[in-house]
Image (cartoon, helix red, strand yellow):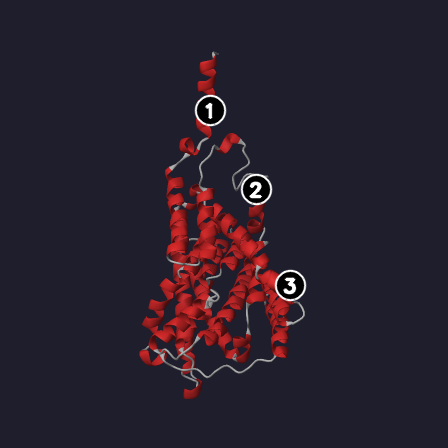
């Protein structure tokens, strides 16, 4: 072989490794989807802390290369860097650590001061079990139906945790779907809240919450842990870390640990979680009819959960005296999107009465929704695993 032939042969071999030579239509579609997620995050300010890592991860996971090259760069290739990061998703390490951060950042005072608000968070979980029945009717296996239904809780880490245990082959689609609906809370919930409430209900003023003592705040994570995990032991990884993080915050003696769990550690986990979840959406696995069904059932679950919370408040008001009625606009906060859905409640309340501040009231069902979604996940895991 002459020198020229040698150069041409090597050049052709090099071209065979490039993305241009290995690109398929599905890769290009998913790269556009990833760019769209990044655009939503930056231009529309839709949960940039979630959508920027996920969007870039979608692009990263769909860069085409030769599968037989043995380069050890793909997410599903053993010993690759991305595969090592992905173990935290596949083995379920990341979600409990996210719950640790949530617990360390969350103030449960609104729920402690008005315990009946936990009923709103519980009612919102109806979306999960309603979607579970619907997914079964569509022909999904019970394990798959449970993983899809948990999307209704609007809780990305819980969706990842449950799907990694019950249906790992659908985890990428379920995770992206869950985070997408979390980011779209400001788009989906307000029209639904207006549809289900009257102008008179939207301007209900609620009494200021009572002051919660430090003793109550310290006892809450301990009692909450015992009650929830005795009922649903399978939810221990999520519930245990949630209440542990909150105890670090409220004890008054572990401030440094609480700050680390709620800031630096949480940020690192969110980056790795978002990036690897995005990378898992490879076109060959993601662009299927099953994914379309997952998004459809997930949307239905989220809408049912939001609507059930609002309607349950209206039902509660039938039995409450006039001075203790609850503004139904906080019912949407029964889903687990903290604090996004609580902010939606507050913003919509101010839209109809600029003196009606609902944020602290809405945080009650919002944090109850976090607990409720973890309990629901534990329940499904308990009877399906």
Q: Secondary structure at mark 1?
A: helix
Quadrant containing the C terminus in the rendered view? bottom right
Report the residue at 51% width, 71% height from top: 368
Residue 31 found in image quarter? top left
> What's the distance in space between the residues labelled 1 and 3, CA to CA?
53 Å
Horizontal relation, residue 270 to residue 329: left or right: right
Image position of 359 with respect to 148: above or below? below
Image position of 382 with respect to 85: above or below? below
Q: Nearer the viewer, mark 1 or mark 3?
A: 3
Q: Which residue is mark 2?
A: 81
- Ranked by sequence position, the earlier of labels 1 and 2 is 1
Q: Name the foreground residue: 375 vs 244.
A: 244
Instruction: Assess disc 2: are there few (<14), some (14-19) or many (≥20) residues with their C-alpha within 10 Å of its C-alpha.
Output: few
Instruction: Assess disc 3: are there few (<14), some (14-19) or many (≥20) residues with their C-alpha within 10 Å of its C-alpha.
Output: some
Tell me, yes or no, whether the two marked residues, 3 and 2, touch with CB atoms within 8 Å.
no
Q: Which residue is mark 1?
A: 13
- Ranked by sequence position, the earlier of labels 3 and 2 is 2
Report the residue at 41% width, 73% height from top: 346
Horizontal relation, residue 351 to residue 115: left or right: left
Q: Which residue is mark 3?
A: 257
């Amino acid at each position: 072989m002459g020198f020229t032939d040698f150069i041409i042969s090597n050049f052709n071999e090099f071209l065979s490794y490039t993305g241009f030579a290995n690109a398929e239509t599905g890769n290009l579609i998913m790269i556009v989807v990833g760019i769209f997620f990044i655009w939503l995050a930056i231009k529309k300010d839709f949960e940039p802390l979630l959508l920027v890592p996920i969007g870039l991860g979608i692009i990263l996971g769909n860069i085409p290369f030769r599968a037989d090259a043995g380069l050890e760069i793909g997410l599903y290739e053993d010993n690759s860097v991305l595969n090592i990061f992905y173990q935290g998703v596949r083995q379920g390490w990341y979600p409990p650590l996210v719950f640790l951060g949530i617990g360390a950042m969350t103030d449960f005072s609104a729920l402690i001061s008005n315990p009946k608000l936990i009923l709103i968070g519980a009612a919102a979980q109806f979306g999960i079990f309603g979607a579970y029945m619907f997914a079964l009717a569509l022909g999904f296996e019970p394990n798959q139906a449970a993983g899809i239904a948990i999307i209704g809780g609007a809780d990305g880490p819980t969706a990842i945790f449950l799907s990694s245990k019950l249906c790992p082959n659908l985890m990428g689609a379920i995770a992206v779907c869950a985070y997408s609906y979390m980011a779209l809370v400001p788009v989906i919930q307000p029209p639904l809240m207006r549809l289900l409430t009257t102008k008179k209900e939207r301007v209900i003023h609620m009494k200021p919450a009572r002051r919660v003592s430090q003793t109550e705040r310290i006892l809450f994570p301990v009692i909450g842990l015992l009650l929830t995990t005795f009922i649903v032991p399978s939810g221990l990884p999520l519930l245990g870390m949630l209440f542990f993080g909150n105890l670090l915050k409220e004890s008054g003696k572990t401030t440094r640990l609480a700050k680390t769990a709620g800031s630096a550690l949480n940020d690192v986990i969110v980056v790795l979680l978002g990036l690897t979840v995005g990378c898992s959406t490879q076109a060959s696995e993601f662009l299927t009819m099953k994914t379309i069904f997952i998004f459809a059932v997930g949307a239905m679950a989220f809408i049912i959960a939001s609507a059930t919370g609002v309607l349950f408040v209206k039902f509660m008001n039938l039995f409450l005296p006039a001075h203790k009625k609850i503004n139904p606009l906080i019912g949407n906060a029964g889903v687990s999107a903290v604090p996004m859905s609580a902010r939606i409640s507050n913003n919509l309340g101010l839209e109809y009465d600029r003196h009606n501040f609902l944020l602290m009231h809405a945080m009650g069902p919002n944090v109850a929704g976090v607990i409720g979604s973890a309990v629901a996940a534990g329940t499904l895991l308990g009877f399906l695993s």
